[in-house]
Image: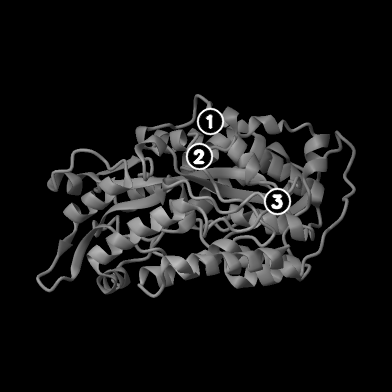
Amino acid sequence: MKRTALVLAVALALAGCTSAGTETIAAAGTEATGTVEFWHFFTGREADAVAGAVKDFETAHPKIKVVVKDSQDDSKMVQAIAGGKGPDVGLSYSTDMVGKLCASGAWRDLSPYIGRDKVDMGGYPDLVKQYTEYKGKRCAMPFLADSYGLYVNKDQLAEAGITAVPRTLAELADAAKKLTKRSADGTIERAGFLPLFGFYENSASHWGPMVGGTWLKGDETSAIGTDPAWKDLLKWQKDLVDWYGYANLEKFKASLGDEFSADNAFHKGQVSMNVDGEFRAAFLKDQAPDVKFGVAPLPTLTADRHGGGYVTGNVIGVSKTAKNPEAAWELIRYLTNDTKAIVGLSNTLKNIPSTKAALAAPDLQLDADFKVFVDMFNNKNSSTTPPTSSGPAYQETFAKWLEEWQAGKATESGLAEVDKQVNAVLKLGG
């Protein structure tokens, strides 16, 4: 599953959504029936896994028919909702959309259904509960989770004489330099680690846990410019960019294949170490079975923070335009609360189960690599990004400035302006 920044069209479409108000729900014990339209973003192998889970749901609920529409991104979904033609059930790849979806009313408040059907929210980990609600309104339920760590090419590390996976950022930079290969004219042939923001999963949100970066203050204003952790991360990143040469990195990046293809740079051995989610292991085994890889928690600024990573996941909700909200909720409850269904999806998609029961299930396929990510998911040093009514706009604002920073066109003093810009988009979202 890919977690990515959303385009401006999403925010604009959501601006047209208004609160759906208090919904009337059926009495407890009423059997849901009819057709449900379900949109999700998965394709290929992953779409087949979701189709299998939906088929199992229909078998268990013979009076409900699910019409699945795959390959749908968030912008299509929210634009359809704003136009009154959205699906009954939508699956978003970005937890960062929850604040906007809840605040705008694009997704319905699920609390009445949760209360009526006595769904035990204590069965979900705290971080999962955190990223599926906004200001007490739970308009989403968790559809599996992701945690991000470090992938390494074992053969290349051994070739360079590196016997241990880097645990700190200093060790990561040292290893990157030893692993990098250049041609006679300085052109990068292999990068030990590609430190550019915007490359694959390299983002401030995914890297923030490496230094414990704080996004927002208690009053929901930007903490980016005043939190020294971000400055530590930026200095480390820019020092490594300068060692490679920004122009050299840009030229090298332009030559690399698409992230979600067999030409992924880590698959091809063009990048020795890379930050990615647990889902990458399944792609490697499918698309690059000869690559001997290892996984580990994210390197951190100080060793005492090691063990954690960035945690996020997919979220699922009932659209305010749903024609059959009761059957929609029944599908959501099955996909997010039925242990057998969750474990089955985890085993096929290779994403982390988002309930405590599924995490402890004996039939969960927990190989050594996957366990590293599950342990990160449960680690006290792991964190996620806070939900806001502006969605991911505050992250996108920072990301734009980071492009200038790594190119040498901005200085640390510019973080004060980042705070102003972030506060402006947060205010706009509210």
Going by the numbered disc 3, the residue's amino acid type is Gly
Eyeballing the image, is 228 above or below 14?
Answer: above
Return the residue at label 1. Answer: 359
Rate crowding at label 1 as few (under 14), some (14 to 19) or many (20 or more) other CA atoms within 10 Å: some
- State whether residue 73 appears in this view: no
Residue 377 left/right relative to 251: right
Do the residues bearing badges 1 and 2 touch, measured as CB atoms within 8 Å? Answer: yes
Going by the numbered disc 1, the residue's amino acid type is Leu
Rate crowding at label 2 as few (under 14), some (14 to 19) or many (20 or more) other CA atoms within 10 Å: many
Label 3 secondary element: strand
- Which of marks 2 and 1 precedes in the sequence? 2
Return the residue at label 3. Answer: 317
Residue at position x 24%, y 44% from top? Answer: 292
Going by the numbered disc 2, the residue's amino acid type is Ile
Return the residue at label 2. Answer: 352
- Whole-Å distance between the Cαs marked 2 and 3? 19 Å
- Whole-Å distance between the Cαs marked 3 and 1? 22 Å
Label 1 secondary element: helix
In this figure, which colouring scheme has been used for the structure? one colour
